[in-house]
Image: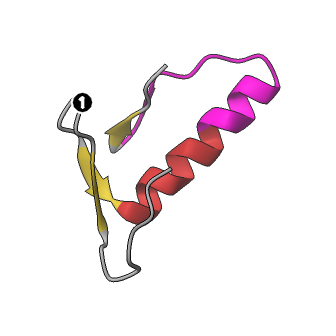
Amino acid sequence: MIDRELSERVHRCLECGYETNRDVAAAQVVLRRGYRAVGQIAVNFGEGKLHE
C-alpha cells in the first residue's frame, strides 16, 4: 500500500496507466475483495478496470 496525502485525489496505476478518482479506486478494491470472498470473479465495472 502506498501512503498518500489526503489532498492527492487521483489514483494513477503505474503499470497500466489507469486513472480515476482516489475514492473510486478504493471502492473498486473493496468490491474486488468482496467478490473474491464469495468466490466470484470480476474484471470490469462501469467507470474503471479491476485487475486480477
Above/below status of 17 relative to 7 = above
Residue 34 highlighted magenta (yes or no): yes
Q: Is residue 41 left or right of residue 47?
A: right
- The spot of residue 22 in percent (x, y) is 38, 62
Q: Is residue 3 magenta?
A: no
- Mark 1 closeness class: few <14, some 14–19, many ≥20 residues within 10 Å: few
Task: Determine the residue located farthest toward the right in the rendered image.
Answer: 38
Residue in view at x 30 percent, y 74 percent? 8
Work out whether 10 lies above or below 47.
Answer: below
Residue indicated by mark 1 = 15
Amino acid at pointer 1: Glu
Q: Position of residue 16 (x, y in %)?
A: 21, 29
Q: Quadrant of residue 20?
A: bottom left
Q: Residue, x 61% and y 34% (percent of image)? A: 32
Question: Range of the magenta residues?
Answer: 32-46
Q: Residue furthest left?
A: 17
Counting every numbered tag in the picture gives 1
Q: Where residue 26 appears, x then y in whole percent?
A: 51, 55
Does residue 34 appear to the left or right of 14 in the view shown? right
| Residue located at (82% from left, 24% from top) | 38
Q: Secondary structure at mark 1?
A: loop
